[in-house]
Image (cartoon, coloured by chain):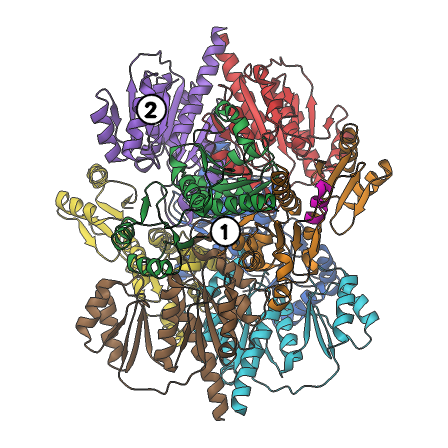
Chain colours: A blue, B purple, C red, D green, E orange, F yellow, G brown, H cyan
Amino acid sequence: MPEVILGLGKTPEQIVAIAAALLERADRLLVTRVEPAAVEALTAAIPDAKYHEIARCVTVERTAVPKPDGVIVLCAGTADLPVAEEAAVTAEIIGNDVRRVYDVGVAGLHRLLDQLSLLREARALVVVAGMEGALPSVVAGLVNAPVIAVPTSIGYGASFRGLAPLLAMLNSCAAGVGVVNIDNGFGAGYLAASINRTALTSRAD
Amino acid sequence: MPEVILGLGKTPEQIVAIAAALLERADRLLVTRVEPAAVEALTAAIPDAKYHEIARCVTVERTAVPKPDGVIVLCAGTADLPVAEEAAVTAEIIGNDVRRVYDVGVAGLHRLLDQLSLLREARALVVVAGMEGALPSVVAGLVNAPVIAVPTSIGYGASFRGLAPLLAMLNSCAAGVGVVNIDNGFGAGYLAASINRTALTSRAD
Amino acid sequence: MPEVILGLGKTPEQIVAIAAALLERADRLLVTRVEPAAVEALTAAIPDAKYHEIARCVTVERTAVPKPDGVIVLCAGTADLPVAEEAAVTAEIIGNDVRRVYDVGVAGLHRLLDQLSLLREARALVVVAGMEGALPSVVAGLVNAPVIAVPTSIGYGASFRGLAPLLAMLNSCAAGVGVVNIDNGFGAGYLAASINRTALTSRAD
Amino acid sequence: MPEVILGLGKTPEQIVAIAAALLERADRLLVTRVEPAAVEALTAAIPDAKYHEIARCVTVERTAVPKPDGVIVLCAGTADLPVAEEAAVTAEIIGNDVRRVYDVGVAGLHRLLDQLSLLREARALVVVAGMEGALPSVVAGLVNAPVIAVPTSIGYGASFRGLAPLLAMLNSCAAGVGVVNIDNGFGAGYLAASINRTALTSRAD
Amino acid sequence: MPEVILGLGKTPEQIVAIAAALLERADRLLVTRVEPAAVEALTAAIPDAKYHEIARCVTVERTAVPKPDGVIVLCAGTADLPVAEEAAVTAEIIGNDVRRVYDVGVAGLHRLLDQLSLLREARALVVVAGMEGALPSVVAGLVNAPVIAVPTSIGYGASFRGLAPLLAMLNSCAAGVGVVNIDNGFGAGYLAASINRTALTSRAD
Amino acid sequence: MPEVILGLGKTPEQIVAIAAALLERADRLLVTRVEPAAVEALTAAIPDAKYHEIARCVTVERTAVPKPDGVIVLCAGTADLPVAEEAAVTAEIIGNDVRRVYDVGVAGLHRLLDQLSLLREARALVVVAGMEGALPSVVAGLVNAPVIAVPTSIGYGASFRGLAPLLAMLNSCAAGVGVVNIDNGFGAGYLAASINRTALTSRAD
Amino acid sequence: MPEVILGLGKTPEQIVAIAAALLERADRLLVTRVEPAAVEALTAAIPDAKYHEIARCVTVERTAVPKPDGVIVLCAGTADLPVAEEAAVTAEIIGNDVRRVYDVGVAGLHRLLDQLSLLREARALVVVAGMEGALPSVVAGLVNAPVIAVPTSIGYGASFRGLAPLLAMLNSCAAGVGVVNIDNGFGAGYLAASINRTALTSRAD
Amino acid sequence: MPEVILGLGKTPEQIVAIAAALLERADRLLVTRVEPAAVEALTAAIPDAKYHEIARCVTVERTAVPKPDGVIVLCAGTADLPVAEEAAVTAEIIGNDVRRVYDVGVAGLHRLLDQLSLLREARALVVVAGMEGALPSVVAGLVNAPVIAVPTSIGYGASFRGLAPLLAMLNSCAAGVGVVNIDNGFGAGYLAASINRTALTSRAD
């Protein structure tokens, strides 16, 4: 497993120091929630660090690991991309070949239904949604695999910074949905990777 | 327009007294949120009062009014019926021939999609939902007519007595949705009737 | 119907790219919640784009559509203007000749009562209010047409960013009120347009 | 000043014991929030105790005090009567001749406007309201005397047991409004009496 | 009465325009919540405008009005001064000679008790407090005159921007307390002035 | 998959009718949140219905399905048993041989650490906790398999009916945790079964 | 230390079974939050069990332990007694001679000030308060020893079941205050005992 | 005891003025929550002022006081350091030799268990935690001394600025925990010092 640093609440100096220390004993590293100043400091200090702009993540990968498919990340559009990408980048560095489905929303059901056969091949689906947070319920009604729901804070007013989709997801009428914190793309990607690894490890038995 | 009494917070004696006073000058009456004791008192005092058990309403209709169609009430199932029926009974006594579509939910989209041509004929749709409150968003994505969303308090835990679907409906990603209070079937039925009457009155111009 | 972009949570580059793509197949466009940088980018890229400063919207209208009257937008004063104007601009580009009544408030009832005959001509009223959010209840007590209530986040302290007027509107003692999200002028204008169109389409039957 | 016992959270035995002890040194007593069992115990133990059923109060008055006018209590209807009466009974036993105006609400403004000259004679107005809590704002826009606003817990759903009118009253667009706790008729009556007494004591200077 | 402008949510241009219009028919003006840019614009446009820095208010007084005493404003210290001063400046321009008691807090009771005889001379007391909001309860236990409690948003964490003292004040164990919105010094000063004027007008009867 | 009825908000008559209808086409049924009256009605109408008292569930199993191991349910003690058992019974009827570990809590870590090798064999762990909700975080720090966290409403005061453990679980410092609604043992058992089935189906590839 | 059972959420049968099991290896037991049915079952099964009615606790003490003084429990009156007594009984069975001061409140400061020299002798003070929750702040301003603040749920309306005093105590302007959960008399008594024991153990060094 | 200034909500000028006034009669001073501008002003005005960067505190110590051990401050990592250091610096200037244990968290239990014998020597432990706030519960299950829990606002989404760990700590399943406000390192350090002083003063008896 890669080492992980949550960038939030840490200064660039602290992040670089922790990253350097971790890389002495690890060959894969993920830094999430990196502000521009920390990105600059990290890429200056660690030449092979890679910045994922939309995901606001930095990764270092010094050994290749196998990356089987099985994880799909869905969201409805542009504003949710940072969280969806954080989930995808997380699952990728842990060791997954992630499929992205980013143009589906409950107000345009046909685009979602068009992807149905693809969705049914997944071993774990990360579904990212802001606003009314209905997408995970709709998806979980269409597939049998576990759905990991991620509410986002994009919205305004009675979204209350993501409380609205969070509550919607916790109250999903469709079973088989686990919820992570608002904007927690990392947690969702990690959990999806954990489910996929459990499945594939079981297969190897 | 019929006279209306909100039964909540009033004793049976108070309800009967107000009802009797109103019926001296009105020929149609709607009493909502009637507890069993008040039902008994009302039907004893007013022989032509009619009790709508699921809707928890009592109505008195002493003159016939025209009841055009145009209003549809939707919900996903058994637990939301009291609120859906309160909306339907309200629209009916105001003067509408209400169509009920009560077996549709976001976890089983095909039943909803099967009703699509019917839904597109409505001039106003009342969509009642508890749990994650996604149904109005999905319906509003499929029709052009105004959608009135009613969250219900059925649920538990992080539903917080209907807060979850209320917030979801206020944050709907689909435009054209107006929201009423949690469990406020009356308000939704009244607003649907108001929209339908405005449309039909305009037609008569 | 015009295409719509919610500017919130999108970069100027993303907004311009989406706008350009939409305008290849649409001849009317509405962009809401546009920050100054995005306004500059949009008006540079799309010469016939029109900026509505108070409403914080940009519109493009390449074909004329009929604009019947029937929609009125009300608010109490200066601080609520951005939301009221977002509602008005939205209803206009969809196809309405919107009447604005912007100097009425519950602490000076006579100015509201002076407009009574005008208000009673509307087929849909958008009522915007911050603070205690009482205006929609008072208006709905005076007219028969549907009232769309829009709470605003202007206020401080126990307004809790618009929660106070939102709750007040959801609990209106006057029937016939549908509520949209805090500051959601777009949603209110869209719903008013939807009601007016339903009425006028019905008339044409 | 009379002695006061808040009945809430006390057993009938505790209430009777405290009342008996207080009456050894006081000749006026007010017990609020009295449950039926405590009413029975109190009236059995204290023969001259008087029960005010709607107000849910018990009073004992063993000396007459002057009761000048100046305090008016307003509410919109039946469901708010218990709180309005608690305010009135409180102001009365402290020493006021209270005027009640109980049939006024924001959805029927004309009944309120009909009472305008009466309202303008008050030195302190207690305005009780549930639902959207708009009445104190409207009243404060019409009079110059201090308005004491009392939110009530009557309502449902997004009333959140009186939170909606409480927030509305705290955010009143009309100045000159002081707010007390939800359902706190006692506090409002006490404060009105305090204002009236201050005024009349000043007059006597 | 002076004209009043709430500066919050208005641009400097809007504030100056409204102020100029009001001063054409009024000779006293109060502008609250003025940001530095608006202060500059106002004092440039209206030469006799006076800026009250701590209170964040601008006043214009073109005729002298009598300023009787009777109003006292209390707070515990430096951080609550802006709100306390807003209350004091408001009561002053309405027409009061305000007494300030600014060094009293519940953690140092003796300084409060030292002022007891002064406090008991007031006809209305404005008590401003942040943190646990206990000061109004303690003061109301010591005086008979009406107490107007103003919670402030100064604090952090579980203060929740003033919610903590707001709730404390609404639940005061001492009777005779009316509460205004968080940080609403203006409302408190206005209400205190209203009580004092009622008292003094009554005296003149 | 078995058919499922959520008993909450349905009358015994409604539950029996739905159950009978479902059993005409299904051979396995789970009814959750069954009140005693509904239990009586169900077991009278359906002779082979089995009541799980602690879990408050009724099951009907008319065909045997394979029940592989892989799912573990943990909780800290007596008060959380109803939710833990609902999860276990759900996973069992879907088709799992569930291992229960019910005597572990964060205030007595050694009992948890004693079970470590068992816990590390699971393919999915359901961790039920009320109070401070720390158990899922501690467990997720010890195992690699996915953890499904279930907050319970057991507690008082600042538990706010389960909000405290819900928030704690959403903010877990350990990655790999998905959260379901407060008291939602069913959802957790279903999700665990979904993960286990995905793993075992993959193995069979 | 005695064994402790939280009675809340457990059936009488479960409580008796756990108590019996614990008493096989312990000679002191405390059961808190005991409902009448459980009291009956406990005293029937365990003859030397002692019921503390106001505290709603049952204790068993089979060996005497030394009970030094040092702990004082304060509250303002009748309604807070159950919580105050739970704290006192808890500290007693752990091994303290508890002093009770139950007639002090912030609205009658002199009774509190009369006890000042007693309060200053304590090594730990438990201060129980509902309503505005100001008592711990006032006490902590008068003594140097640690103050343990216990909010109670007694109150109504904007008390929100004890949230108001909880927030007040967390925001205390006086330093040296630690807060426990709403109504958590047990936790406060336990913490006071822990502080007193630490002090007395240190003395013995 | 040192004098204390809470820097929050005060201008640099106000802080320097208060500090200078206090230092005329005191020889030890602690200023908390100091912004950079105030640090500069303080160190310029008071040459022997010492800035503690991570703790965001300034101290002045002009006489040495004895600093016995007995207080331990724990936290899980980098982001909680400012609060932990505020607690430590506070306890130090009051007069304690504070031991810091800053690399322990519930997701890596072994590092905590490695420190067990050290933790058991403390007379008071300050345990700082953000995220799910579980650390104080785990620590209190391992030691007998009083635990002071400090929630931090570090986190995002459903942390709600520290509400999540605050509620978790108030609902701790381990007894002997007192909680202070979110981010209130000062209050925790002060209370720990108060407990340690009480213990050592008792010892001296």
Does residue H47 appear to the left or right of B62 in the view shown? right
State how far apart marks 2 and 1 are (Cα): 60 Å
Q: Quadrant of residue G79?
A: bottom left
Q: Is residue F56 above or below residue C28?
A: below
Say what secondary structure mark 1 lies in: loop
The residues colored magenta run: E87-96
**Where does the image place residue C193, in percent across and percent down from the top left?**
56, 21
Query: Is residue F48 rendered magenta in the image?
Result: no
Q: Are marks 2 and 1 in contact (CB under 8 Å)?
A: no
Q: Nearer the viewer, residue E132 or E29?
A: E29
**Where does the image place residue F191, in percent across and percent down from the top left?**
38, 52
Reading the image, the residue beneath label 1 is A69
Looking at the picture, which amino acid does disc 1 mark? Asp
Q: Is residue C89 above or below residue H193?
A: above
- Image point 32% across, 46% down: which residue? D50
Reading the image, the residue beneath label 2 is B30
Q: Chain of mark 1?
A: A
Q: Is residue H138 above or below residue G108?
A: below
The local crowd at label 1, few if under 14, some if 14 to 19, many if 20 or more residues have their Cα within 10 Å, is some
**Where does the image place residue E106, in percent across and percent down from the top left?**
59, 64
Does residue E40 appear to the left or right of F154 in the view shown? right
Query: Is residue E95 rendered magenta in the image?
Result: yes
Does residue A110 appear to the left or right of B93 in the view shown? right
Say what secondary structure mark 2 lies in: strand
- Image point 73% across, 84% down: which residue? H63
Q: Nearer the viewer, mark 2 or mark 1?
A: 2
Q: Nearer the viewer, residue F84 or D83?
A: D83
